[in-house]
Amino acid sequence: MLPLLVIFLTVVACLSPWLKNRWQYRHIPGPFALPLIGNLLPIMRMGLHEYMMQCRLRYGKTFKLYLGKAMLLVTADPDVARKLNYRMINRVIQGQLQLNEDDKINSQGLVVARDETWRTLRLAWQPTFQSGSLEGYAELMDSSALQLAQHLKQAAVSGEPVDMWRELGRMTLHVVGSTAYGVDFHTLEQDASSGAAAEGTQLINACQTVFAAGSITRGSIYILLNAIIPLPWLVGWAARNMPDKRITQLIQARHTIRSVSMDLIKKWRAANPASEPAAANGTANGVAASVETPLIDEISAAVPTAPAAAAAVDVAPAGSKDAAADGAPDAAAPKGKAETGRRKGPMAPGSFMGLMLTARDKNNGSALSDTAVIAQANTFTLAGYETTANTLAYCVYNIALHPEVEQRLLAEVDAYGRGRKVQYRDLDQFPYAEAVVREALRLFPPATILSREVKEGGFPLTPEVTVPAGQQVMSFLYGYQRDPAYWPAALEFKPERWLPEGAHLASKNPDAWTPFGSGARMCVGWRFALQEAKIALVRLYQDQTYRLQPGQVPLALQQSITLSPRNGVWVTVVPRS
């Protein structure tokens, strides 16, 4: 009798949250969901982005679905998403497996940090992406893009197809090493037999594994079980003690990336012996502990989003006269008194680690802990590798599909000069290249959804439903960036919609384009990413073009941590005459 009672109570405990949510949000439409499993079966078959798109078409701009046991409230309305992202600053990262020390480290990264911890970190990151700092990175970005272009010439001679997605990842990781840390990660090393090339390949593989293994549909069975079973401690214990292949690979990959970050810290301290070490384990003077900084005012300035019309793009191109002046604050960042947030002038390439290690709060002098610094380095390395590589791969794919786009891009590149170094002061000479990048980001944003945790006071999701504090709400940017209600010819790749001549194709809603997010937690490195993508695109098309291998239309996509090409983007490199 007792075992049956235990089983009964366990079932009730598991089903109670599901039943409560179903009743509480009964006015929000959504697909039928099984207890605990939710909508995982169609999500695993179609991918989260496509399943949510179907929900958007069937249920409207506001709907709910279940990712296993977790209910997701979703808005595909850019106006509601703007209010959500501006009013709420905390992200919700649920269902994370606790595997080892790396989980504690990664929880302190800028992407997932919360409240005062996030504000302190954001201010510490700011100087890295001021326009003066970006100017110093331009030459390094150009050098990396040139190395990749020269490597691809060998593929043009051999005629062997190459996966541009993976090749571009080698370049973006090289850019991270040179710009952020002042080191060569050797990811573009041509001599495959060298030890340096092996180290570079190991780091690339580690980054790839982190993104692939994080997928609920293609990752470890334990990630799937963690989404279903309401006993995370039990799933975590099983994953640690009986790891499958994916978990083992993920642990090894995280260890590789952490080791690189720790080595960068050691090298910086060896070169700067007078610097004071931060707290090693997040005690009172480290950001991992409760941050003692005073409350920093919420963001009040508007952040860059999309053009209200194509003739008035309000995200100033890096290097243009409208870009922020050196030392100007990041519009998307909180305002506060952290010393790093008040630093004037540009940061030299390779300064990121020093910036993190020397950051101090002006009120109490507290520093980031070593674990927090490692977390920031991990964040920069991973984000800098994946997102821009994805965007450039989508650019190459769509350029190859549209000869008229390729022709116009080549004309712009040739007008600047074939073989000519791409310099920061000349970036405004490539409006069409930038338009190509922006259009790729519209159709294929790196993140398809943005998560926010509702704070005290609730959030009015619909006139009938106010979401209480603690609940998460997702904004489905992949949906509204492809919505014909906001974009004429919404599913067509038309870079001209970003130029004055294409005003009739531009969205009249300035919040319908948010590939970098919006509000206070908008991507701190958005200008860095746009600059790198534009420089790379110009360099890659100076001496060659790219022809798609058969069988890639439409392009197969996969949703994991980011939206990426499922099987890569395979091309034949064609030399230009």
Image (cartoon, rainbow, N blue to C red):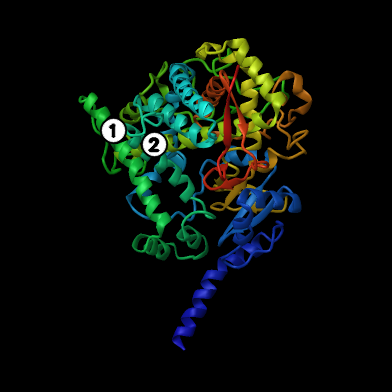
- In this image, 178 relative to 78: left or right? left
Q: Element under label 1?
A: helix
Residue 182 image offset from top left, x and y in percent: 35, 24
Sequence-wise first label, 2 or 1 = 1
Is the residue marked by circle 1 packed among few (<14), some (14-19), or many (20+) residues within 10 Å? many
Q: Quadrant of residue 26?
A: bottom right
Residue under the point 70% across and 29% down: 402
Is the residue marked by circle 2 packed among few (<14), some (14-19), or many (20+) residues within 10 Å? many
268, above or below 97, in the image: above
Residue under the point 33% across and 41% down: 258
Tags 2 and 1 in contact by the CB under 8 Å rule? no
Q: Element under label 2?
A: helix
Amino acid type of the residue tagged 1 in the rendering: Ile
Q: Which mark is residue 235?
A: none
Seen as rendered, the residue at the extreme front is 158
Q: Quadrant of residue 242?
A: bottom left
Residue 219 image offset from top left, x and y in percent: 48, 54
State how far apart marks 2 and 1 are (Cα): 12 Å
Residue 384 image offset from top left, x and y in percent: 46, 33
Q: Nearer the viewer, residue 88 or 194?
A: 194
Q: Return the residue at label 1.
A: 265
Q: Quadrant of residue 486?
A: top right
Seen as rendered, the residue at the extreme bottom is 1
Residue 267 image offset from top left, x and y in percent: 26, 29
| Residue 521 visible somewhere in the drawing | no
Residue under the point 49% across and 33% down: 167
Amino acid type of the residue tagged 2 in the rendering: Gln
Q: How many marks?
A: 2
Q: Which mark is residue 376?
A: 2
Q: Nearer the viewer, residue 485 or 16?
A: 485
Quadrant (top left, top right, bottom left, bottom right) of the C terminus: top right
564, above or below 124, in the image: below
